[in-house]
Amino acid sequence: MLFPANYDVRVLEELPNLRVRRLFFPGAREDGGQNGVNVLVSPNEGEPWIGTFASGGFGLGFEGVFSCPNPFTLCVVSRGPAYLVDVQRPEAHTIFDHITDLRCSVNHQLLLFAELTEVFAYGVAGFVWKTTGLGLDDVHLTSLTEDTLSGTCWDLRSDDDCSFEIDLKTGSHTGGAFEP
């Protein structure tokens, strides 16, 4: 956990025999859903709950659990989709599809998400900025410095990867397949 959180979270390899509310995402449904990443969430204030976060099913992406700049928000990435959940009101959640990479900028209080073609930032109050199309596919993040995020993407014209650099304050970028 890079950001301070008003909750504890534990990834579950097996579902425990606990009498706590179980929610299936997307939808925060209690009547069932798809398999995926299981986590036990214990808010500092409120009742604990187990979340099952459905995976994207297309084999891309990664799995991970991250604290967010907002101390009441949890981020779960489940092989494609990223779920941003208010731990005290899990019904209040946002889903981003096709997440291929993620970085945390503590200095700027941002979670930085790479999708297939773009990068966007999520901060304390929510969505901050989104790049214009960086490439046609395969956006990967390679390095993070104090004020910039670098990566690569696929460029149709050259049929090869190209690099880009994003200003963390504004979301503007240089490089990429479609440089503004």
Image (cartoon, rainbow, N blue to C red):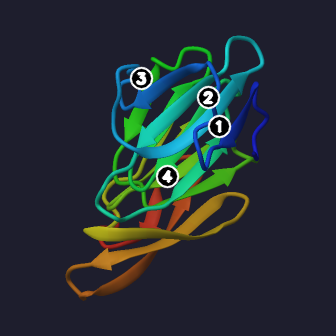
**Dot placed on the residue nearer the N-terminal end, 4 or 1:** 1
Q: Amino acid at mark 4?
A: Phe
Q: Amino acid at mark 2?
A: Thr
Q: Secondary structure at mark 4?
A: strand
Q: Is residue 125 left or right of residue 93?
A: right
Q: Which residue is mark 1?
A: 68
Q: Amino acid at mark 1?
A: Cys
Position of 165 relative to 132 (above/below)? below
User: Looking at this view, is 99 or 170 the one in front?
Assistant: 99
For label 2, the crowd category at 10 Å Cα-Cα, with few meaning under 14, some 14 to 19 and many 20 or more, is: many
Q: Which residue is mark 2?
A: 73
Position of 127 relative to 140 (above/below)? above
Kindly identify which numbered label has been placed on residue 28. Answer: 3
**Dot placed on the residue nearer the N-terminal end, 3 or 2:** 3
Q: Alpha-carbon distance for marks 4 and 2?
A: 15 Å
**Dot placed on the residue nearer the N-terminal end, 3 or 4:** 3
Q: Which residue is mark 4?
A: 113
Q: Position of residue 117 (x, y in %)?
A: 32, 61
Q: Alpha-carbon distance for marks 4 and 1?
A: 12 Å
Kindly identify the residue that appears in the image at 24 percent across and 88 percent down: 158
Q: Position of residue 86 (x, y in %)?
A: 57, 22
Q: Secondary structure at mark 3?
A: loop
Assess whether mark 4 and mark 3 are in contact (beta carbons under 8 angstroms).
no
Kindly identify the residue that appears in the image at 39 percent across and 36 percent down: 95
Q: Nearer the viewer, mark 1 or mark 3?
A: 3
